[in-house]
Amino acid sequence: MEIRTILVPVDGGPPSEAAVRYALSLAQEERTTLVFCHVQVPVPGYVLDEPLPTGMNVESPEALAWWSAHVLERAQARAAQLGLNARTCSVRANPVRGILDVARAQGVDLIIMGTHGRHGAARALLGSVTEEVLRRANVPVLILPPAAPPRSSGNVDAEDPGALA
């Protein structure tokens, strides 16, 4: 299987950071194009890892757009620092539909995603975007567990969580 384009959905959380780190390393080896995608979904009570600019409500469309741009810029900057070809996209959609639509539109060969590793009631209540993408995708999906170690090859700095999105 030749991997030319990899989709990496990002949200700024630790699972997506692990996916970005892994994708960067794989892209270095395979010289593939990376597509970082953020799906803007308003989630009541959502907590961001960083403060919003003054005056923004976390649930506002402006805040969603700002956060989307922020996590995408971080991921793309990391790829550029490594000399990798990367592009970004931001969509407002159901997360599963958004990821699958971007995968089809971008003609990706692989999707790399992190998972929160929820079990039991938390998983039943919150659902699993990763699981649904895995079931419905028409390309392979690589899922990284929360404690996934970074790939051992490449120059990706696994110790710099602020550099990844």
Image (cartoon, grey):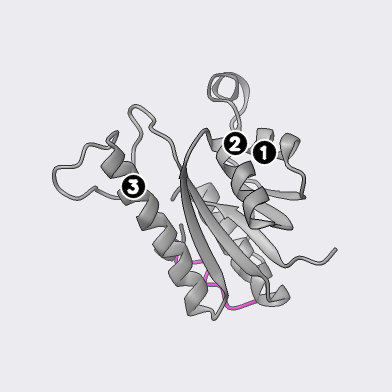
The tag on residue 93 is none
Tell me, yes or no, whether the two marked residues, 1 and 3, touch with CB atoms within 8 Å. Answer: no
Q: Residue 98 location in percent, x, y?
A: 56, 41
Q: Is residue 61 above or below residue 50?
A: above
In reply to whether residue 160 is colored magenta, the answer given is yes
Q: Is residue 163 above or below residue 49?
A: below
In reply to whether residue 150 is colored magenta, the answer given is no
Q: Quadrant of the N terminus?
A: bottom right
**What is the spatial separation of the Cα atoms under label 3 and label 2, in whole angstroms?**
18 Å
Tell me, yes or no, whether the two marked residues, 1 and 2, touch with CB atoms within 8 Å. Answer: yes
Q: Residue at x 53, y 58 (%)?
A: 36
Q: Residue 33 location in percent, x, y?
A: 63, 69
Q: Amino acid at mark 1?
A: Val
Q: Secondary structure at mark 1?
A: helix
Res. 71 image quadrant: bottom left
Number of numbered markers: 3
> Principal SS element in the magenta part?
loop
Q: Amino acid at mark 3?
A: Ala
- Magenta residues, start to end: 154-161
Q: Residue at x 72, y 67 (%)?
A: 4
**What is the spatial separation of the Cα atoms under label 1 and label 2, in whole angstroms?**
6 Å
* Residue identified by numbered label 1: 133
Q: Is residue 92 above or below residue 84?
A: above
In this view, the residue in front, 162 or 94, is 94
The tag on residue 96 is 2
Q: Residue at x 34, y 47 (%)?
A: 65
Q: Is residue 39 visible?
A: yes
The tag on residue 65 is 3
In this view, the residue in front, 93 or 163, is 93
